[in-house]
Image (cartoon, rainbow, N blue to C red):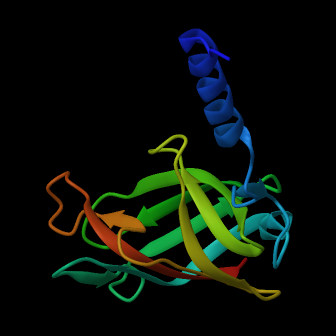
């Protein structure tokens, strides 16, 4: 029995499409519910610590006399105002959510500056305290005030006001 080249090609393409279209269950799921519900963050927050650590530089904006405030909506949208003591303030905004991957929950922030992308962080919430801790490249800070933000790790501690 002779198999045509077209039939063989069609069968090969069909098998490949079927293999790539099947989910292996490892896809991330974005959700508002995790170890705590994102809606629990709604309100106003003042930072008691705001550390940015780069390759060779470090600053705690609050310890150095500045302020960091954040307002969070119940849907996870937020705006953060960073007001260093030695320069003009600036804002960062985005959305907070949970990324569920392989049965684990990761606190995530999609920064408006980078649409369609997000970073994951460690986060804890008590009735009055929120901490957000990221690894390398989880934040940015302009250490030398030249208009270019350098990659940093981000560690924030907020108190609810």
Q: Determine whether, in the image, residue 104 is placed left or right of residue 63.
A: right
Quarter in which the C terminus is drawn: bottom right
Closer-to-camera residue (10/62): 10
Position above or below: 93 against 64: above
Residue 129 in which image quadrant:
bottom right
Residue under the point 31% across and 57% down: 88
Residue under the point 69% across and 55% down: 27
Residue 145 in which image quadrant:
bottom left
Residue 18 on image: x %, y %: 71, 35
All told, the count of numbered labels is 0
Residue 28 on image: x %, y %: 69, 57
Residue under the point 65% across and 80% down: 123
Q: Looking at this view, name the residue that lies furthest to the front.
A: 1
Residue 133 on image: x %, y %: 52, 81
Closer-to-camera residue (135/149): 135
Closer-to-camera residue (141/139): 139
Closer-to-camera residue (107/93): 107
Residue 113 in which image quadrant:
top left
Quarter in which the N terminus is drawn: top right
Q: Determine whether, in the image, residue 117 is placed left or right of residue 144.
A: right
Residue under the point 46% across and 45% down: 114
Residue 117 on image: x %, y %: 52, 48
Position above or below: 42 against 77: below
Position above or below: 12 against 90: above
């Amino acid at each position: 029995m002779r198999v045509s080249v077209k039939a063989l090609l069609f069968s090969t393409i069909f098998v490949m499409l079927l293999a790539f279209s099947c989910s292996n269950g490892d896809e991330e799921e974005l959700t508002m519910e995790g170890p705590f519900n994102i809606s629990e963050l709604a309100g106003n927050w003042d930072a008691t610590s705001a550390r940015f650590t780069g390759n060779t530089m470090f600053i705690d904006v609050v310890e150095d006399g500045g302020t960091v405030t954040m307002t969070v909506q119940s849907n996870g949208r937020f705006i953060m105002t960073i007001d260093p003591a030695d320069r003009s303030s600036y804002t960062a905004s985005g959305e907070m959510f949970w990324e569920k991957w392989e049965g684990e929950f990761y606190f995530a922030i999609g920064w408006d500056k980078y649409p369609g992308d997000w970073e994951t962080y460690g986060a804890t919430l008590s009735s009055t305290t929120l901490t957000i801790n990221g690894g390398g490249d989880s934040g940015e800070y302009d250490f030398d005030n030249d208009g270019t933000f350098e990659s940093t790790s981000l560690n924030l501690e907020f108190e609810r006001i």
